[in-house]
Structures are given as C-alpha cells and as structure tokens.
Amino acid sequence: MHGVKEKDVTSTSVYPGLTAEAVLARETALARFARWEADHPAHLEPAAAIAAVAALYDLLRASSRLRAPDPSGVMAFHAILLRARSAAP
C-alpha cells in the first residue's frame, strides 16, 4: 500500500510489526500447503520418521536441547491470528 500504514495487530516482542494482512497471507499459504499435503501423503515408515526427528534434534545446539520446550511463540502467533481475523474487513 502506497504510504498507507497497515494496522499493527501485535503487541508482543515475538512478532514486532506484524500486520493483519501479513498474518492472513500466512494463513492462506498454510491452507494451500495443507491442501497440497492432503493430496501428497507421505509414505514414511514409523522407524524412518523417528530417525528423521532424531536427526533434526541432533542439529540443535546442546544449550537448546537442555532447555524445556517453550510454546509461548506459538501461543503468541495464535493470539495474533485471532486478532488479525477480527481486524480483517
């Protein structure tokens, strides 16, 4: 938008400056991926899936692996998404 500032829908430091339009665009993209994923099911044996998760876990720094999981970023994004939906025209 030329010179028009979009409404900032977040008051958290997790996603500073995030706009309702950006959140809705992300939601649209995730929905598009979910449709694609439904048409392209993964054929992965359970053992291979566990091995893949373990390999990703190994990529984390040791300090990250020692910390307790923190879902606050996900919870903040969910709250932002709800506000974006209510702010959308």
Image (spheres, grey):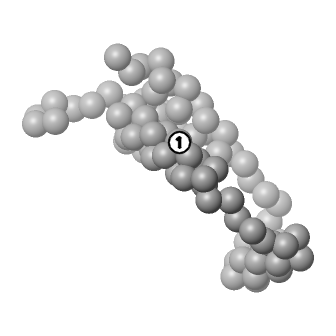
Query: Total number of numbered labels?
Result: 1
| Quarter of the image that includes the C terminus | top left
In the displayed structure, would residue 21 be above or below residue 72?
above
Q: Position of residue 40 (x, y in %)?
A: 62, 59
Q: Secondary structure at mark 1?
A: helix
Q: Nearer the viewer, residue 68 or 52?
A: 52
Q: Residue at x 72, y 77 (%)?
A: 56
Q: Nearer the viewer, residue 72 or 49?
A: 49
Q: Position of residue 84 (x, y in %)?
A: 46, 27
Q: Residues within 10 Å of mark 1 (few under 14, many from 20)?
A: few
Q: Is residue 64 left or right of residue 30?
A: right
Q: Residue at x 21, y 32 (%)?
A: 5
**What's the amino acid at mark 1?**
Ala
Q: Is residue 58 left or right of residue 79?
A: right
Q: Report which residue position mark 1 lands on.
A: 31
Most extreme residue toward the right is 47
Q: Residue at x 70, y 65 (%)?
A: 42
Q: Residue at x 53, y 42 (%)?
A: 31
